[in-house]
Amino acid sequence: MLHGHHMKKRLSKNKSDIYFVYPGNINAKTGGYIYEKNILEYAKIRDINIRSIALSENYPFPTNNDIKYFLKILDKIDPDSKIIIDGLALEGMYSIFKKLLTYNVIALIHHPLYLEFKGQRSKKFLRLEKENFKKINKFIVTSKNTKNLLINEFKVLNNRISVVEPGIERLVKYNFKNNSKIHFLTCGSIINRKNYLFLLKVLKPLDNFILEIVGDTTRDISYYKKLKKFISKNSMNRKIIFHGTISDTKLAKLYSKTDCYISVSKYEGFGMSLANALIIKKPIITFFTNTILNTLGKKGVIYFKKFEVNDLRNIIIKYILNKKKFKKLNIDIHKNKRYLLSPLESAKKFVKLI
């Protein structure tokens, strides 16, 4: 467990204390963890006492021992203290909600977990969310669309929900010569929700491109192996590059080098990687959701609305491989004036709310 305080030494029965509960490794390069780490680092610099508590990475499917561990922590916290709980952890705690909600809980929701899964697992989370979200007194969410979802789908009162968009780091821009091949970039952990297999099928018959994929390859090993098998079977090894998790410097260089950022993710709570592309002024192709439309706006962005291989392939041929239309897309992205908060602005706003 990383960065969590030791129960015996650090926790106190002080109602002015603020606790921040999250599962797993906060140093992981995912949008949610980057968001939370930014808040904790800001609080530390400003001498604001937020005590972080790292729980098992098993959440939202904790073991009995994981729950027992958290209950021991709860017993050492004054019920009037504020406890911010990341949604991934919170949605693994439905079995102890009755006890949990005797505390001053602030739910941090990036997106409800029914959107993360499919089939019976999705249906179960949706049922539990409908049953329990309306019992929580305060939410902080990362987009207006998530707020609207909580109001309309889960009947949460408007005045219980605050929106704090993620802060987007301003990446250093590097100069590169024009690519002889079209370079696509996409970022996100190698998991089913990011829908990479669909993207590979779209790109399969195309030539003269390179797709760079940045993201943790260890979260779903079987899905990663499925992708590698598809790449090998279709002789795409020289076209597809997996970078895994990388430094900010290397990430900035990949963004600078790319011709087009492409996202085929089924759902995003905000779309931080897409926001990076907007800030560095790279044309974007992405699946349409109201959340992403709110994050990016329209200029320099091509949206597709259904996961049809031929449809997306035709969009790439029409807008990226066509030099005239691609030039216009580059001009349009520079006209996009959507303002995105900096990490400092986001953290300030979050801390003010708690």
Image (cartoon, rainbow, N blue to C red):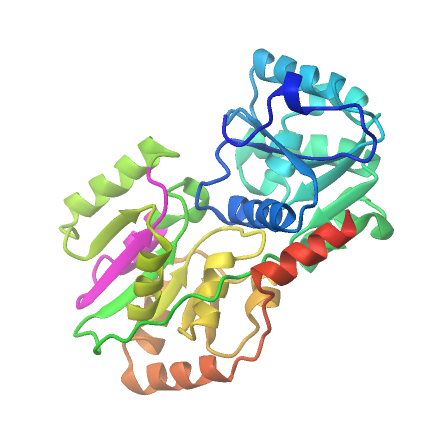
Magenta stretch?
A: 197-217
Who's the residue at 16% across and 44% down the image? 232
Residue 325 drawn at (x, y percent): 35, 84
Nearer to the camera, 183 or 313: 183
Residue 99: name its quadrant.
top right
| Residue 212 falls within the magenta-colored stretch | yes
Q: Is residue 170 above or below residue 41?
A: below
Give the mark count: 0
Q: Is residue 16 above or below residue 343?
A: above
Who's the residue at 64% across and 58% down the image? 346
Who's the residue at 60% across and 65% down the image? 341
| Residue 209 falls within the magenta-colored stretch | yes
Determine whether, in the image, residue 254 is placed left or right of residue 123: left
Nearer to the camera, 250 or 126: 250
Nearer to the camera, 45 or 4: 45
Q: Is residue 43 above or below residue 301?
A: above
Determine whether, in the image, residue 105 is placed left or right of residue 86: right
Who's the residue at 49% across and 51% down the image? 266
Residue 66: name its quadrant.
top right
Q: Is residue 301 above or below residue 74?
A: below
Determine whether, in the image, residue 267 is placed left or right of residue 123: left
Residue 199 drawn at (x, y percent): 34, 55
Residue 52: name its quadrant.
top right
Residue 252 drawn at (x, y percent): 35, 63
Residue 127 drawn at (x, y percent): 70, 32
Whether residue 61 appears in this view of the structure is: yes
Whether residue 164 appears in this view of the structure is: no
